[in-house]
Image (cartoon, rainbow, N blue to C red):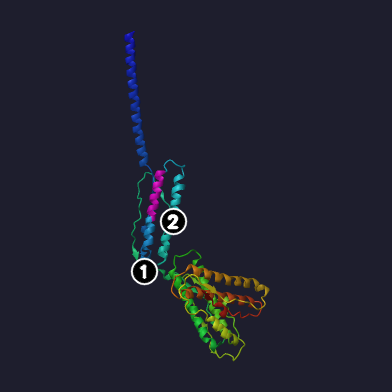
Amino acid sequence: MKRYRSYAKGSSAGAKRWRVAGVAGVAVALVGVGLGVAAAADSAVPTVNCPTVADKLGAVPAQAQAEIARNLQLLNTQIQEANNRIRTTQGQGGANFIQNAILGPLKDKRFAAINRMETAIGRTIAKPDLNAEGLSGCSLNANGGGNASPEPANVPAASVSAGAAAVGNVGTIVCPDVVINVAIPAQAKAEIDRNLALLQTQINEANARLKSSVGQGGANFVQNAILGPLKDKRFAAINRMETAIGRNAAKPDLNAEGLSTCSLNAAGGGAAAAPTAAPTTQAPANNGNAGNNGNNQAAASRNTGNVGINDGTAQVDCPDVVINVAIPAQAANEVNQNLALLQTQINEANARIKSTAFQGGVNFINNAILGPLKDKRFAAINRMETAIGRNAAKPDLNAEGLSACNLNK
């Protein structure tokens, strides 16, 4: 019995030793398999594969080089961030996680960056179409790998002269001819000539801005930033000519409303001919308006000297516009709109004085704020004259005298 028990005890211990060894062996084997699976899984992490952009740029103007380089680097950074997120979110989300959470946002970021490059180039030469829609979408390298920084930092430069040639066909401004077909009093001739020349200058300036702003703004940029302001300037110039003639003869209707609007000739060329005037004639001795001439000239000369450096504290001071004639019911709405606009113009001028403190030189306020304000007021007052004149005798609201403002410091 003892031998049996001793034998049994020995057998039990041996079996235990074999069981422990077997469990340990299985554990080691499983760990090995686990490490292999982990290594295999890590090597199979997909990476982002995006089309290259730099090789589609062509020659880049020197003025755009820095911005292009920044956005190319940003494209690389976006790819690296996307790869990192894929790696750190393994196992998260469902089947569409990578598409919805990584590739979709990456496409939007790339689209914005490529469009910024188009705009940067377009400020100096013709705006290119880099195919942002086609180049913004990325796919996956299912087995990993790929180039995480496909975009170079350096791009070939283009000369400014080459860029200037490239924007030669951006279109031109086309304006209706302004023909003065009434006799011009001798006293008004100089002012008429100045404003006729100014109409051509305005067209030239609008065409210059059309070229220098290629690629800026959205679909309505040309209309809002160039053609709209040009219309106001032309309206004011044509009405100044009506007023100048009207001081010494019957005030004509030169159709300022109809002749102030210009359009864009997308093919270029076709600029309007220089406006023309009728021959000068001797003015009548007295037509009843001469008594107001001195007041107009005095008011128009307000604030023609420089007003000093803008310290942001000045306020615009404009003469009141009082309509002392009966306003036809058909014109009441337009008159009220323009009266409100006059106040809006003053508010905007005051806001600009504050926001541009210490910018520009001693003539900054005159040239950048008071001068444009005068043109806007002149146009608004003349619009009221025209609105009333459609249904009653066209009044003279003294647009020339009431359009100039000065400063309260």
In the rendered image, the vertical position of residue 142 relative to residue 11, given as above or below? below
Magenta region: which residues?
74-88
Q: Amino acid at mark 2?
A: Phe
Question: Which residue occupies 45% across, 54% down?
Answer: 108
Task: Pinpoint residue 61: horizontal percent, then vertical percent.
Answer: 37, 65
The answer to which quarter of the image holds residue 41 is top left
Question: Which of the two residues, 284 or 48, is positioned nearer the viewer here?
Answer: 284
* Residue named by callout 2: 111
Q: Residue at x 36, y 34 (%)?
A: 34
Q: Amino acid at mark 1?
A: Val
**In the picture provided, is 271 more to the left or to the right than 185?**
left
**Category of crowding for the residue at label 2, using alpha-carbon neighbours closer than 10 angstroms: few (below 14), some (14–19), many (at least 20):** some
State the image coordinates of residue 280 (x, y, percent, origin top left). Answer: 53, 88
The chief SS type of the magenta part is helix
322 up-or-down from 60: above or below? below
Spatial separation of the CA atoms under disc 2 and disc 1: 27 Å
Quick one: SS at disc 1?
A: helix
| Residue 128 shows in this picture | no
Q: Is residue 94 above or below residue 59?
A: above
- Sequence-wise first label, 2 or 1: 2
Q: Position of residue 97 (x, y in %)?
A: 46, 44
**Is residue 264 among what the camera can see?**
yes
From the viewer's perspective, tell me whether residue 86 is left or right of residue 178: left
- Of all residues shown, which one is farthest toward the top? 1
Is residue 335 or residue 253 the one in the foreground? 335
| Residue positioned 33% across, 18% down in the render | 13
Residue corresponding to mark 1: 160
**Is 239 colored magenta in this rendering?**
no
Where's the N terminus, which quadrant?
top left
Label 1 environment density (alpha carbons within 10 Å; few <14, some 14–19, many ≥20):
some
